[in-house]
Each structure stands twice: as C-alpha cells, then as structure tokens.
Image: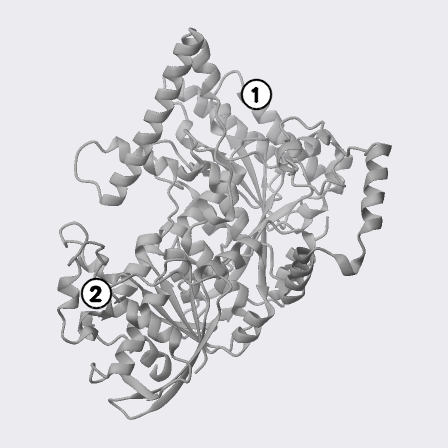
C-alpha cells in the first residue's frame, strides 16, 4: 500500500511516526500491527521513537528533507501482511505548494502511485475564519460564559485597542492638538493579505484539489486529528463530547463537505489520536506521569468512533481492510 | 524611478499594480528609462559575465524551475478557464450587477463563509472551488487578521471580467454543478448604463443564467440618494434589455442589499411606498417577458436582528430552482451529473 502523509506545519506527523514505530517494533499492543521485516535504514524512525520515549517534541522536519519510509508489517489479529511505503514531507512543503502554486515532479510521481493518504490536523494550530463581526458579537456578550477561544479573541482585540489608544495619546502629547490629530491618525492601513493567512481548512481542501486528478481512485483517506488529548480534556459541561467525525464536521466543515461530496474520489474516516498521550512538559520531572507507563504504548490514545484504545495502527488497518 | 498615475497605486513601493495588471499592460504605469551612463555600466558588467560564470544561485534557481510544475493559480478565473469548467459539467453563470459598493462581492464572500462555518447550507454542500485563494484574499478586509476596525470589502477593480467558482452538491439528489459568479466592477456597469454601444458589446450577459441586480437599501431609503440609485440601476437593466444582451431565458433577481440598514423610522411607510413604485417600474420595463423575483438580503449585517447571510438561502434556491431538485427513488450514494445534453448549458462563454 502506497500512502502519502499530508499535513500543514505542526500537524503532528513526526510525533505520530515516532509513536507508531515504537508500537509496531515493540509489539506491546497485542492486536496491532508489528514489524514483519525491519527496514534497512531505521535511523530516522529511531530518532523519532527516541523523542517519543523521552517525552520530547521531535525536531521540525526540514523542508528539503524527504524521507521515504518502507515498512513491512503483520496484523497480529489476522496474520495478514502489508507493506506501507510513505514519503515523509515536511508541513512547510505543503504550505509552500499552497503559497507558490508549484509542486515538484518527484511529488507528482509519488502521488500518481498513491492509493491512500493519512491527513493530519492539529486542533491547536487551526486557523479559523474569524470575522470582525464575530468579534463584535463576542464583545457584546457581556454576561454568560464565553469559550476559551472567544476569550482569546476578545483579549487580542483589547490588546490592539489599548495599543491604538496609547498611540493616539502620545500623538496628542507630541503635537499638542487634540481632536484634529486624533482624526488624522484614525486612518490606518490594514495588514496586507498573504496566502499564509488562509484558513487551515481552505489550505487542506486546496492541497487535495491539486492532486485529485492524479490519485488512484477511490483514494482512502485516514484523517488523524492529532493532540486528541486536548479535546478529551475539555469538560463536557463546556463542550459536549464529540466523536472525531463530529469534531471534523464542526471545526473543519469545508473539508468535511468537500470529502463527502467527492465520494467517487475519496473515502475517508476520522480518528482522534494523541500520540504523546498528553502535552509534554519542559519542567524537570514534568513528564513523570507519562513516563511511568511500563509499556509506553499504553499512554497513546486513539479514538475511533466512540471507542478509545491505544492501537495507533488503526488508521492503517482501516486503509487496508476498509 | 518608476511611478503610476492611478490614484492609490503603490507600485513604486511594492511593485504591485492596484488593478492586478501586468506592469507592461497597465496604461498608467510609467517605466523609468535608464540614463546613458547606467546603460554603459550595465553593458560593461554584462560583458564580464558569460554563461559558464553564472553565479551559483542562478543555477540553483534554474534547476529548481526544471523540477517543478505549476498548478492552477487559485485566483479568479478568466474566460478561457471558465470555458474549461463549463465543458466539464453543468455550469451556471450568475451575473451580479449594480453600481459600485452595492454589495455584490460581499454577497459572494458571505455565501462562501456560510459553507466554511456550517455543516451544510440550504440543501447544498461545498464540493470544490478553483478560486479559493481569491475568496480568501477578498474576504481578508472583513477578518480579524486584517486589523481592520470595521469589516470591509474592497472595490472590484475595473478590469476585464473575472469569475469566482464554487462547485456545489445537492444533499438530497446528490447532483453536482458548477456556479460561476461574475466579478465585474460597478464602474463597468456604469458604462453599460450610459452607452448602448457598450451594452451591446457586453455579450457575456447572453450566457447568464441569472442576472442579479442590486439596489443598496441604504441608498434606496435615503431621500437624498434614492432617486439616483433607482435610475442608475434601472438604467443598467434598460440598457441591456434594449441592446438585447439580456434575453428572456435569463432569470432576473432584484436584490435589496444591506437590508439591515432599512431605516425603520417615522418614514418607513414612505420608504415602502418608494420600493413599491420601484418594483412597478421594473415590471413595466420588463413587460412580463422575464422570470422576475425580489429578495431582501443582509449578507454581512451589523449586530442586530438579522443573522449573518440573511436572505442568501432564498437566492441560492432561486438560482437552482427546478434544476437540482430531488428525484424520488434515486438510489443514495450515487453521484448523478446533471443532464448536460442541453445545448445552452454547454454554450461557450464569450466576451
């Protein structure tokens, strides 16, 4: 099976690979895949695994670094064997494709042999379509609870308003003219748009559109919502618990609609995965709880529908078995 | 130093034409002619450099360019691109018309925003777009990232017609279809209003499935502006119908945009009376020859009683009325392309 790993910067691909390699190589999870034949070059995989085992964030994948990973695995529950081949491109590579509207011929050749994709999305790094009118509405809600996201937006606005006020005050003091200089300095330039400011879901849809005609169809896509521990930690009283599929439909509706509408090109399933188990701490002994698992595989969290377990190979199983 | 006579253009600073034209085609751009001393020094320098001594960076760039392929730009489409889309499947052309700042672009952007923030909109889901970057760029002044105090939409520049594209799927019938919105400047429509010759040349209107004429409610309910607002918009309609570039197969939809700004004061009855008379004038002009309907829309209302995108759902349904309706007993999960055997739907777009 030839699989492409896709995702924007900080989407969690490297953390996933490190945890995945540990699971398949250690055999700690009974029903998961295990390595059938060790890949010749394991240096990259072992580096990522070391980061996982040491509770350290993996180094950012460099843009020019393209590592092809070939894994021969066996499904312990069925005995079936499979070979996964995936080039590991950096998130910045995908971001550059979107921004500069160019793809390499090598990437194109890889895509033309692809019959599956694992698409990573990190809830912590989502750019959303925040309208100015949304912020105005939030500011108007002076009573009742607002969500953490709303609070951050409000805080950002208040910081900007305070900065503007301070600027005006200093101009007043400098010029000695009150209202006239205030009016003059009210005309300000907006921040110029760049493609990097686009919403995450727009980028992801566009990246799929770019390659849609080149893929072997129908292409199966496992969507991995990474850092899923953050979602699981939200109290139900604040936000009702959602399955990964429901989370995608709510938070990335454009992507969800695009994949649903183009069912002749794509079949997709959504998984919530915390490869790390929790956010890493930089404090001494800050990761003790995570490191206390005798089997490190057991700190991984994987949600498939309503059920939660530790088997990080489930997205691959679905790609093979449907 | 290079300069531009177009007001507001910062090409001398950022190298970018305010109308998005290539610099060598912009009539306002002034190329700076190098003086003879500069020419001489450049000649001497180029004599010293031959191909084998190219700086390494140029070789790297050339190698890079050999290894990459271009993908579609993601920006607004031109006529050639829309013809490719219309050949690929059923395509509706929605022509948005009206004077500058009537809310034409804001309506399209708000429609896109509704798909970006809801699991579906009306009976449709988003199935793709070739112009996602353009939607994002145009929507930028209305977003928090812009650092704007108030949401805005920039005026469409006065350039040849461009198109924004959305592909939609009906959730009940699973039929898909392309929608192309013309992004034509208000200035262009002003020219059409003022000249039969210009109206006759506007052949794109022949292909329009819907001609959506905007009346800015704020102007229509202002005693100072309502008369000129009415005559300007009616002038566009009259010019195109008399020039026979707007034909009866095109649905005409009258949109009262910015409906949240309808002034519900003591003059409300007078405003309603004016709008009634306006509708009568439109109906007299069209003489019952066209499929005509009216819509009140607040695409991006200020905080108040109107929800975001008020009125857009009715408009969207009107665009697809009787085309993408539910087929009883149609098996689920089977994609059905609209019947593209109708010649008209495959007509090329012409300018």
Q: Nearer the viewer, residue B336 or B245?
A: B336
Farthest residue, direction bottom: A79
- The label on residue A277 is 2
Is residue B304 shown to the viewer in this render? no
- Taking the spot 65% from the left edge, 26% from the top edge, the residue there is B7
Give the percent coordinates (x, y) of residue A195: 51, 48
Q: Is residue B145 left or right of residue A313?
A: right
Do the residues at pointers 2 and 1 share their chain? no
Chain ID of residue with mark 1: B
- Taking the spot 57% from the left edge, 64% from the top edge, the residue there is A103
Q: Is residue A85 left or right of residue B86?
A: left
For the residue labelled by badge 2, is the local secondary structure a helix, a strand or a loop? loop
Q: Is residue A144 left or right of residue B143?
A: left
Is A6 located above or below residue A115 in the figure?
above
Give the percent coordinates (x, y) of residue B9: 64, 31
Cα–Cα span, label 2 and label 1: 67 Å
- The label on residue B227 is 1
Q: Kindly indicate the quadrant of the structure image that contains residue A246.
A: bottom left
Mark 2 crowd level (few <14, some 14–19, many ≥20, 10 Å Cα): many
- Taking the spot 21% from the left edge, 74% from the top edge, the residue there is A297
Give the percent coordinates (x, y) of residue B265: 36, 19
Quadrant of the image containing the N terminus of chain A: bottom left
Chain ID of residue with mark 2: A
Is A254 located above or below residue B1 in the figure?
below
Quadrant of the image containing the C terminus of chain A: bottom left
Is B137 located above or below residue A200 in the figure?
above
């Amino acid at each position: 099976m030839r699989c492409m790993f896709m995702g924007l910067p900080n989407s969690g691909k490297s953390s996933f690979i490190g945890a995945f390699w540990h699971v398949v190589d250690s055999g700690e999870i009974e029903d998961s895949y295990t390595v059938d034949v060790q890949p010749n070059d394991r240096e990259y995989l072992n580096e990522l695994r070391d980061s996982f085992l040491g509770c350290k964030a993996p180094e950012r994948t460099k843009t020019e670094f393209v590592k092809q990973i070939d894994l021969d695995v066996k499904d312990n529950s069925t005995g079936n064997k499979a070979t996964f081949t995936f080039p590991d491109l950096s998130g910045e590579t995908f971001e550059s494709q979107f921004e500069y509207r160019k793809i390499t011929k090598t990437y194109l050749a890889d895509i033309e042999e692809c019959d599956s994709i694992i698409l990573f999305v990190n809830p912590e790094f989502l750019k959303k379509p925040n309208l100015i009118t949304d912020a105005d509405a939030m500011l108007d809600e002076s009573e009742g609870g607002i969500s953490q996201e709303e609070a951050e937006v409000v805080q950002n606005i208040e910081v900007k308003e305070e900065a503007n006020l301070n600027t005006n005050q200093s101009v007043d003091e400098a010029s000695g003219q009150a209202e006239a200089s205030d009016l003059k300095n009210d005309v300000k330039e907006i921040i110029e748009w760049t493609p990097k400011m686009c919403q995450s879901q727009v980028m992801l849809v566009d990246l799929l559109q770019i390659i849609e005609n080149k893929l072997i169809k129908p292409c199966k896509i496992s969507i991995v919502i990474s850092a899923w521990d953050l979602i699981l930690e939200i109290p139900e009283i604040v936000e009702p618990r959602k399955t990964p599929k429901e989370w995608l439909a709510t938070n990335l509706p454009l992507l969800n609609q695009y994949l649903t509408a183009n069912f002749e090109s794509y079949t997709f399933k959504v998984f919530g995965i915390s490869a790390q188990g929790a956010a890493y701490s930089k404090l001494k002994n800050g990761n003790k709880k995570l490191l206390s698992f005798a089997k490190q595989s057991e700190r991984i969290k994987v949600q498939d529908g309503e059920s939660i377990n530790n088997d990080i190979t489930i997205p691959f199983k679905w790609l093979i078995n449907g | 130093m290079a300069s531009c006579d177009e007001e507001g253009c910062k090409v001398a600073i950022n190298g970018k034409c305010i109308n998005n034209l290539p610099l060598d085609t912009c009539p306002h751009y002034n190329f700076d002619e190098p003086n003879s001393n500069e020419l001489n020094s450049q000649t001497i320098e180029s004599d010293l450099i031959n191909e084998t001594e190219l700086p390494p960076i140029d070789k790297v760039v050339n190698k890079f360019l050999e290894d990459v392929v271009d993908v579609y730009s993601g920006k607004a489409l031109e006529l050639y691109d829309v013809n490719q889309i219309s050949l690929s499947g059923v395509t509706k052309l929605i022509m948005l018309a009206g004077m500058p700042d009537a809310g034409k672009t804001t309506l399209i952007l708000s429609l896109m925003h509704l798909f970006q923030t809801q699991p579906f909109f009306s009976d449709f889901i988003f199935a793709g777009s070739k112009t996602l970057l353009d939607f994002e760029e145009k929507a930028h002044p209305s977003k928090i990232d812009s650092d704007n105090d108030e949401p805005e939409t920039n005026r469409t520049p006065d350039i040849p017609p461009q198109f924004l594209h959305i592909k939609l799927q009906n959730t009940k019938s699973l039929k898909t279809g392309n929608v192309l919105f013309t992004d034509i400047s208000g200035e262009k429509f002003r020219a059409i209003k003022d000249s039969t010759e210009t109206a006759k040349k506007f052949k794109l209107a022949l292909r329009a499935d819907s001609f959506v004429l905007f009346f800015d409610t704020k102007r229509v309910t202002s005693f100072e502006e309502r008369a000129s607002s009415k005559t300007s918009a009616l002038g566009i309609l009259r010019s195109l119908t008399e020039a026979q570039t707007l034909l009866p197969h095109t649905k005409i939809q009258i949109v009262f945009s910015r409906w949240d700004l309808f002034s519900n004061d003591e003059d409300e009855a007078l405003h309603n009376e004016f709008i009634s008379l306006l509708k009568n004038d439109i109906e007299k002009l069209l003489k019952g020859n066209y499929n005509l309907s009216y819509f009140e829309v607040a695409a991006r209302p200020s905080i108040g009683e109107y929800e975001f995108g008020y009125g857009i759902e009715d408009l969207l349904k009107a665009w697809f009325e009787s085309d993408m309706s539910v087929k009883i007993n149609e098996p689920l999960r089977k994609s059905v392309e609209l019947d593209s055997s109708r010649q008209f739907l495959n007509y090329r777009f012409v300018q």
